[in-house]
Structure formats: C-alpha cells, structure tokens
Image (spheres, rainbow, N blue to C red):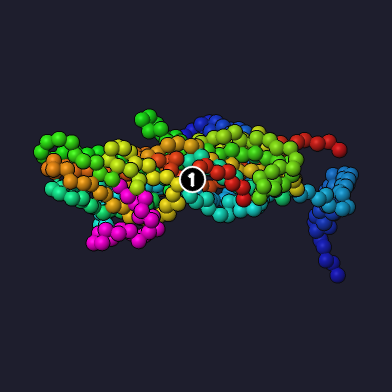
Amino acid sequence: MASPKTIQIISMVLLVSLAWITPSSAAIKSRTERATQLSVPFWSVAAVKNSQVTTNAPLVLNWSVSGGTAYDFFELRNTGNVLLNSFRVSVTQVRVKGSGNANPVFFESCTGGVWSATTLTCSGTIQLIGSSNDLIMNFSSLSFAPSNQISMRARTSNSNRDNYETSLSVLVSRTDVRPGQISHS
Amino acid sequence: MKIFGKLGWRSLAGFAIGVSMVTIFGQGVLASLNATVFNTSAQSLTAGTLKLDLANNGNGFNSSISNLVPGDVVNRYVTLTNTGTLDGIGLTLKTAQTGTSSLINDGIAPATTKALRLTVTSCSVAWNAAAGTCGGTSNIELAQTVIGSLTSPVALVNGALASSSSKYLQMKIDLPDQNETTINNVLPANTVQGGAVNLTYTFDLAQRVATGTNS
C-alpha cells in the first residue's frame, strides 16, 4: 500500500507531465489522403513450334538432312503485355553426330500471313531475316502487339553431314519497347 | 387572566434581549458592503478551424497510371486548399505503398533495379494540367525521392498555408531508365516488369503557432 506521501509525489508528477504534454497534443491538425495505382508492363517473346504451348526454354530444331532441302516451322509469340518495336534471336548450332560443319539454316518470316507446312507457302510476304551464321538475328521496325505471333520458316539444304541441331533463344530488352515519355494530365 | 407568571416574564424578557443582541451584531456582519459587476453583453469566443482540402486538377490522383516503362515521367496535378479559418504551417507529405518491392525501393546489390521516384513542385497559380506549365513562379517542394523513403512525413519546403489559400502542386512520378532483358519468356530476377503499386498520399497541415495577444 503506497503511503500518502508517495501518492502526493505521483500526483505532482502527473500534473506537471500533463501541463507539459497538453499544449502540443492539443494542437489542431488537418489531414487529407488519396490513393492511386501504378503498374509496369512486361516484355517477352517466346519461340515455339506451331500451335504448341509456350515453354520457358530455347527452341531446338533437329535436322537430319540426307538430301534436298529441309524445312521446319515455328512461331515467335509476343507473350508480354506491351507493344514491341524489335527483339533479337540468338542462334547456336551443334553437331549431334558425324563430322564436318553443319550447313547454315536460313530463317524467313511470313509478314502479314502464316506459313503452310504442307504447301511450303506463305500467305503474306516472305522476308529473309537472317541465318545461323549471323549468330544473332535482329527483328526490327516492328509493331508487334501482345498475343500476336510471327510465323517463321527455317530452311537448310542437304549437308550429308549427319545430324545437327539449331537452338534459338529470344532476347527482349527494355530498348525494344517504346522510349520513355513525359505525360501531363 | 394571568398568562405568565413572575418567572415566565423574566424568561421572555431574557429571550427578547438575546434575540435583539444577535440581531444587532448579526446585522453588523450581514450589512457589510458587496459590489458586483458584469458585462451586459456576453463575450464571444470561437475556436478556429483547420481544414485541408485536396482537389484534382485534371486527372490528379483519380486515375491509375498503367503501362509505365522505365524512363517514363508522369505528372499529375492536385490543389491543396486550407478551407479552415486558421492559418496552417508545417505542411508535410508521406506515402504508404504496397505492391512490387522493386518499384518501392531501389535494389540492393546484386540487384540494380531502380524504384519509382516522386518530385513535388508548386506553382504560385494553378498549373495548366494538360500542358504541364506553370504561369507563375514554381518551386521545388520535395526533391526527387524514392517513394519507399517517404513512409515518414517529410516537410515540404514552403509549408505555410494561410486560411483560404491554395497550394498548386505537380506530383511527378518517374521510373528511372534501366535495362532489363527477358530471355526465352523468363523475366530477370528482381524485375520491375509486371509490377504494380498502390500508392496513398497523405498531406498533414498543423495550426499556426499559438499566440498571446493584448488589446
């Protein structure tokens, strides 16, 4: 049980504290608040065989050319959610067995249409993008919208050098998207 | 008829004398002078008010900002008005944000991502929100700051806001340019891509300094 003197001291301390605290805490303040949202898109392109699901891995084309010209078909899909002006495809070739260098592979797009694997025809405009010798193929001056695809044909001639494979990796950088803008509204 | 006896008269007389003395001396105390004065019309005292109002100038904070790519700068305009009767001082701003961390705070090595930044500029007259121009004098109220650093109130440079006056603000959000390469549909680690942030701006205004007056 606290003595009367202790109670007196505590009371004094409380009174003094209140005297100091009250003026600042009693000051009037006014607040206003607003919320908003911001979002950033993502840029991405995938190389996949026609009508196949997108995978997060390089597309590998396997060749076994004994004679004539061989073809393979694939798509480059804009899997992001922003318009792309350009992107790049890195090409590497590996001999699986046999000897000697693999023949170059040429890549052709079918602008405004699609390649037919059965008739080997393009319903749009054929454009040679590059070959495996280039190591990097540049797709430029595009207006490549999200969910759209570019129909591609890979072509190589008889090598008589057994099997080899071509690996395609797609790279999309910040610079492939529109430049930064200043907006007011 | 004899009503009081000899003793009865004496008692009555003594009682009467006592009462008289009490009355005489009592009256002496009760008769001391008192004076009272009061104001015939009551003095009126009213407490002041402090009301901070925020209005959008153009889109302001009403519409969200989407598809922001590195290098983008988005300017939004708001007007703060002290609609109270008291002058205000010490205007501060803080933000609360939730969402993608790489958009809130700069990356820590080895991540090199750069987060959203806010710059606040005032204009002495209302901003032209469509053109982004100030027809008067502009002042930087808050230098470019990463939004994650604004969780505690930061004083604006010119924090006074008199009663019935307005502060016209440009709220500039920018996402620093930074290179990110997506390979085979795989986003880089700690990316800003695909990110989103909910951002709440809070402005606080305090009353003017209390004063003692003589008049």
Q: Residue at x 84, y 44 (%)?
A: B29
Q: Nearer the viewer, residue B73 or B154?
A: B73
Q: Dot 1, how many residues are within 10 Å of its Cα: few (below 14), some (14-19), or many (20+)? A: some
Farthest bottom residue in view: B1
Q: Residue B125: x and y, percent?
A: 74, 44
The answer to whether one can see residue B147 in this image is no
Q: Residue A63: x and y, percent?
A: 17, 47
Position above or below: B23 against B148 = below
- Kind of residue indicated by mark 1: Arg
Position above or below: A19 against A142 = above
- State left or right for residue B100 relative to residue B74: left
Magenta-colored span: A107-127
The picture quadrant where one finds residue B206 is: top right
Farthest top residue in view: B109
Q: Residue A136: x and y, percent?
A: 33, 38
Q: Residue at x 75, y 36 (%)?
A: B211
Q: Nearer the viewer, residue A21 or A42?
A: A42
Q: Residue B147: x and y, percent?
A: 51, 39
Q: Residue at x 49, y 51 (%)?
A: B66
The quadrant the N terminus of chain B occupies is bottom right
Q: Chain of mark 1?
A: A
Magenta span contains residue A149: no
Magenta span contains residue A117: yes
- State left or right for residue B7 relative to residue A45: right
The answer to whether one can see residue B41 in this image is yes
* Prevailing secondary structure class for the magenta stretch in the rendered image: loop
Q: Nearer the viewer, residue A144 or B150?
A: A144
Residue tagged 1 = A178
Q: Nearer the viewer, residue A87 or A161?
A: A161
